Amino acid sequence: MESTLESVNRAEEMADQIAARVGLDEDTRSGVSMAVREAMINAVLHGNAYDPGKRVNVTFEQNGRELVVTISDEGKGFVPEDVPNPLAPENLLKQSGRGIFLMRAFMDEVRFRKLDPGTEIILIKRLQSSGLERQEAST
Amino acid sequence: MSMKASTRQVDGVTIVDLSGRITLGEGSVVLRDTVKDLLGKGQKKILLNLGDVSYIDSSGIGELVSAFTSVRNQGGELKLLHLTKKVHDLLQITKLYTVFDVKDDEAAAIGAFNH
């Protein structure tokens, strides 16, 4: 996907549709969509910095027990541990820095992998149902 | 769905009726410009009515925080009105619910401003 705001919105919509298809309830679905939106913002804005020459790759995968969303960018990368805790009193009134916290709040597991160049964010939501499905977004 | 903002005056308080999504891009910009415009006109008692705001992302949260601190730094007050469950929950988990003065009743909210 291109490094645009439209891609952020599109990935969020896809997440909502796929989360519905795998049977997540409305609240959980909304959380998954928000986590995907935040990961996309991270990739498009902080990673690729809206660079039209850089792409964001988004993959949705259901393996029966989990919905796994993988989002990767081609940016300069970052160290997740270096991101300040947005709940710390001194950070509460900061304008930014809540994206990763929100991903972790709404997903069961969030992993980061350093690429060369870029960052891959893996969002995992555990499911009750079974099945196998894989979808890739590429435009 | 795009963000819309309209303002009205009640007893010296500017009520901003917001609708749509406060998200990265247009929604955040509309909120930022609206508050900036009000402060520029000396309207420092601001009540943000979020009753028709369906969704806020981290960028939107940042804009709410920024609006709150901008108004406060100019000696004004900014309060929030009519949070949807989704927005309420979001402010709870980000520990901002107690930072903002959140009201459920418009008349009570207007009365809570320093007159």
Image (tube, coloured by chain):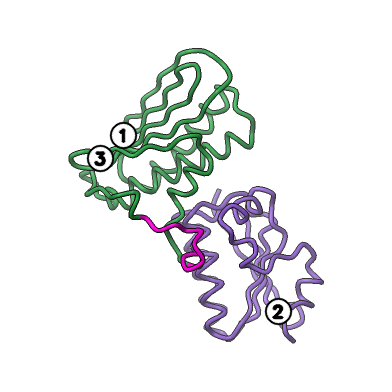
Chain colours: A green, B purple
- Measured Cα–Cα span from mark 3 to mark 1: 14 Å
| On-image quarter of the N terminus of chain A | top left
The picture places residue A56, in percent across and down from the top left corner, at 30, 39
Name the residue type under label 1. Answer: Asn
Name the residue type under label 2. Answer: Val
Q: Residue furthest left?
A: A116
Q: Are marks 1 and 2 in contact (CB under 8 Å)?
A: no
Depth order, front residue of A54/A119: A119
Are labels 1 and 2 on one chain? no
**Total labels drawn:** 3
Q: List the residue tagged with mark 2.
A: B13
Disc 3 packing (10 Å; few <14; some 14–19; many ≥20):
some
Residue A57 numbered tag: 1
What residue is shown at x 52% (from left), y 44% (from top)?
A: A105
- Subunit ID for the residue under disc 2: B
- Measured Cα–Cα span from mark 3 to mark 2: 50 Å
Q: Nearer the viewer, mark 1 or mark 2?
A: 1
Q: List the residue tagged with mark 3.
A: A114
What residue is shown at x 65% (from left), y 71% (from top)?
A: B7
